[in-house]
Amino acid sequence: MTLQLTPVEILAGLGATVTLLAMWRISVRAARRAAETARAGVRLMSLAGRVVVTAAVIVSVQWVVLTHAAGNVTLVALVLGAPALLAGHTLTRALTVTASDTPRRRGDRR
């Protein structure tokens, strides 16, 4: 069996192949961008969840100590002061961030 193709048919086949490869590369890039955007959103929600849970634990411990041991001044000062120190440290670090958390692309300078 002999296959007879004209030059126009060969060029059409090559054009279709190049078009398919270009579309594939574009879709891969778009998927990669979408995945990176989703990861950034998940990071933010995960952080918010951890903050809420930690705050609930701190408030619970403070409430228990203040309702049951309100006469013990040292214990009350410790229960109220330790989270305040940790929150102050965390806020100071969060507000003085100097690095950017953006993904790098090929060819970007450091």
Image (spheres, rainbow, N blue to C red):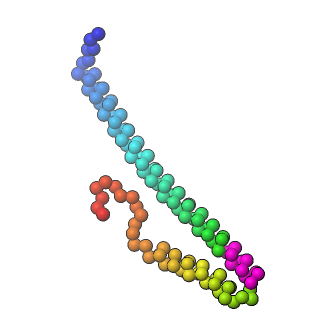
Q: Position of residue 78 (x, y in %)?
A: 63, 84
Q: How many marks?
A: 0
Which residue is pictured at 33% across the width and 38% down the height? 22
Which residue is pictured at 37% across the width and 43% down the height? 26
* Residue 9 in the image: above or below residue 19: above
Which residue is pictured at 53% across the width and 62% down the height? 44
Q: Position of residue 66 (x, y in %)?
A: 72, 82
Residue extent of the magenta highlight: 59-69
Which residue is pictured at 39% across the width and 69% down the height? 99
Residue found at the very far left of the displayed protein: 7
- Quadrant where the N terminus sits is top left
Q: Quadrant of residue 86?
A: bottom right
* Residue 30 in the image: above or below residue 81: above
* In this rendering, position of residue 30 left or right of residue 89: left
- Quadrant where the C terminus sits is bottom left
Q: Quadrant of residue 51?
A: bottom right
Q: Position of residue 80 (x, y in %)?
A: 64, 82
Residue found at the very far top of the displayed protein: 1
In magenta stretch: residue 23: no
Q: Position of residue 68 (x, y in %)?
A: 76, 81
* Residue 71 in the image: above or below residue 50: below
Identify the main secondary structure in magenta.
helix
Q: Which residue is at the front of the view, 5 or 65?
A: 65
* In this rendering, position of residue 43 left or right of residue 108: right
